[in-house]
Amino acid sequence: MILIADGGSTKADWIAINDDKQEEFRVRTLGLNPAIVPEEELHNRIINMFQLIKVKDDVEEIHFYGAGCGTPKPIEILKKILASIFVNAKILISEDMLAAVYATAGKKPAIVCILGTGSNSCYFDGKHIKMLVPSLGYILMDEASGNYFGKRLLIDYFYNQMPLEIAQKFKKEFNLDPDYIKKNLYRVPNPNMYLASFAKFMFDFKDNAYIKGIITHGFQEFFKYRVLPFNKTADTPIYFIGSIAHYFRDILEEIAENNNLKVTDVVQRPIDKLLEYHKNNIH
C-alpha cells in the first residue's frame, strides 16, 4: 500500500492506493507543518486518525508533500515521526511546492503558485523547480496568503482603519478580546492557522470596496515579489493552488492582466490531481 499526502498548515489530505493503483481510502488530518507544529502534536495528529493507524504496518511507501518541508531540519523531524509509526514504509518527503507542480504543470514548464494558509511560488522548467528565495514563513513573507490577510484585518480593526459597518460585522464574527488574540498568537500551536481563520470573513464581503482593496493590494504584492521576478512572458502558463486563489479568482485574474500575464488555471485542492500524477508515474 502507498500513502500520498498533501500536508498544509491547516489540513493534510491523505489518499491510500493499493498495488493495483486503486484508491483504498482517503482521510484528512489537521495540518502537519513541521516548521511550526511541535513534534508531539504532529505525532498525535497522525496516530489519532484511525484509518491511518489501521494500515500502518501495510504501508510500503509514503509520498508526503508538505508546507514547512523546504529545509532539512523540519524534514528530518517529520521523517522521524512517520518512520516511528509506519515502520515498514519507505518515506519520501518534499515541500508542498512540488505537489503543486505535479498537480498542475505535470511535466511541462510553468510558473506555479500557492495561495492558501501560506503562500509561495516557483518556476518549473519541466524537470527542475527554481525558487526565487527561501520561504521564511508567515511572519516575514507569505504575501496574499490567508494568514497575511488575517493579520491585515486585525491590524485595521484595532487601528480603527476598518469601515464601521465592516468592523461591526467583524466584531460579531470573532472573539476580539486582546488577551484571547495574544494567547492564540504567542502561546498556542499554529498561529499562522489562527491568523488565516480571519480570512474567511472576506469571502462574504469581497464586493465591498474596503475588502476588495485589501485583496487587490495583497495580490499585487504577491505578483511583485513572487511572480514578476521570474521575468516570464504572457505565454508562460501560470497555475495557482489553494483556497485564497480559488475564492478570489476573479480579482487574481484582474491583477494578472494588469501585469500583462494570464492565469491558466486555479486548483483549490491538489490531492486528486496529485493522485492522478502518481498513478501515471508509479511503476
Image (spheres, rainbow, N blue to C red):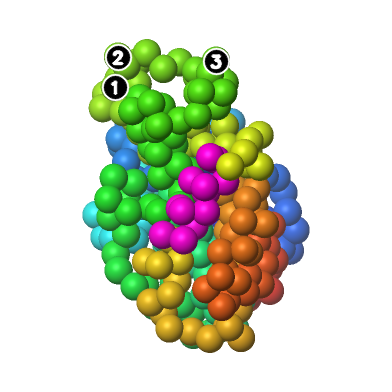
Amino acid type of the residue tagged 2 in the rendering:
Asp
Amino acid type of the residue tagged 3 in the rendering:
Lys
Which of the pair 27/153 is nearer the observer? 153
Q: In the image, is residue 190 above or below residue 5?
A: above
| Rendered location of residue 59, percent (x, y) | 55, 51
Residue denoted by label 1: 182
Judged left or right of residue 48, residue 134 is: left
Q: Quadrant of residue 264?
A: bottom right
Q: Please tell me which residue is depicted at 56% across the width and 78% down the height of the picture.
A: 260
Q: Please tell me which residue is depicted at 56% across the width and 23% down the height of the picture.
A: 165
The magenta span reads 210-221
Element assignment for label 1: helix
Q: Please tell me which residue is depicted at 60% across the width and 71% down the height of the picture.
A: 257
Q: Do tag 2 and tag 1 residues touch (Cβ < 8 Å)?
A: yes
Q: Which mark is residue 230?
A: none
Element assignment for label 2: helix
Q: In the image, is residue 220 above or below residue 263?
A: above
Label 1 crowding class (10 Å Cα cut-off): few <14, some 14-19, many 20+? few
Judged left or right of residue 224, residue 283 is: right
Residue denoted by label 3: 172
Q: Nearer the viewer, mark 1 or mark 3?
A: 3
Q: Please tell me which residue is depicted at 35% across the width and 32% down the height of the picture.
A: 155
The residues bearing labels 1 and 3 have C-alpha atoms spaced at a distance of 19 Å
Which of the pair 55/10 is nearer the observer? 10
| Rendered location of residue 206, percent (x, y) | 63, 41
Residue denoted by label 2: 179
The residues bearing labels 2 and 1 have C-alpha atoms spaced at a distance of 5 Å
Label 2 crowding class (10 Å Cα cut-off): few <14, some 14-19, many 20+? few
Amino acid type of the residue tagged 1 in the rendering:
Lys
Q: Do tag 1 and tag 3 residues touch (Cβ < 8 Å)?
A: no
| Rendered location of residue 186, percent (x, y) | 26, 27
